[in-house]
Image: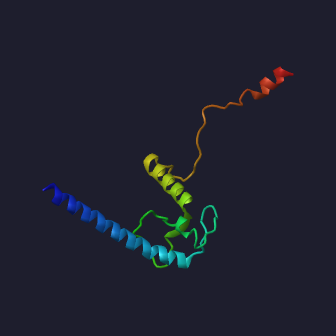
């Protein structure tokens, strides 16, 4: 009984991996023909020898959104791609301000008494 369940799960996982590989090949190949082989963040250039380190990033993070014009794609090196997804996960987990600003309120100023401290030193 458990062998049948394991086989079914293995088949499901194998099919999902196959679909993912097919989907990736399709949009990856199209994006590599469409865009220069340069990371969109760090500007690292790629050749046939290191092209496997250049990834296709979906700007809206939806891997099924692959418009023919490539408007949802961005070529990123594996390092910048990883960083982009880490930032996205943090944004989802911790949220962001509605106005898009990154202003934070500080409660401590380590230099508040610096002028007084310098005057005392003289």
How many marks the image carries: the answer is 0
Does residue 93 appear to the left or right of 99 in the view shown? left
Q: Is residue 66 visible?
A: no
- Which residue sits at x=25%, y=62%? 10
Location of residue 9 (image quadrant): bottom left
Left or right for 45, reference 70: right
Q: Position of residue 16 (x, y in %)?
A: 31, 66
Closer to the camera, 80 or 100?
80
Residue 59 is situated, as x and y percent measured from the top left of the image, at 49, 65
The quadrant in which residue 46 appears is bottom right
Outermost residue toward the right in this view: 122
Name the residue at 48% across, 76% down.
Answer: 29
**Location of residue 36 in the rendering, given as x and y in whole percent from the top left corner:** 60, 74
Q: In terms of depth relative to the viewer, which is nearer, 6 or 96?
A: 6
Q: In percent of the image, x 42 and y 71: which residue is there? A: 24
**View extreme (top): residue:** 120
Residue shown at 59% from the left, 39% from the top:
105
The quarter of the picture where the C terminus appears is: top right
Would you place residue 58 above or below residue 101 in this image? below
Q: Residue furthest left?
A: 1
Vertical relation: 33 (above or below) 20: below
The image quadrant of residue 49 is: bottom right
* Coordinates of residue 67 in the picture (x, y in percent): 45, 76
Residue 37, compared with residue 91, is above or below; it is: below
Q: Quadrant of the N terminus?
A: bottom left
């Amino acid at each position: 009984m458990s062998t049948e369940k394991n086989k079914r799960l293995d088949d499901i996982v194998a099919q999902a991996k196959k679909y993912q590989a097919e989907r990736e090949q399709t949009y990856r190949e199209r994006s590599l023909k469409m865009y220069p082989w340069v990371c969109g963040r760090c500007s690292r250039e790629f050749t046939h020898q290191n092209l496997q380190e250049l990834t296709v990033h979906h700007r809206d993070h939806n891997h099924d959104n692959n418009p023919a014009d490539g408007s949802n794609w961005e070529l990123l090196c594996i390092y910048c791609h990883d960083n982009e997804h880490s930032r996205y996960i943090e944004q989802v987990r911790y949220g962001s301000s509605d106005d898009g600003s990154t202003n934070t309120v500080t409660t401590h100023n380590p230099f508040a008494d610096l002028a007084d401290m310098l005057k005392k030193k003289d």
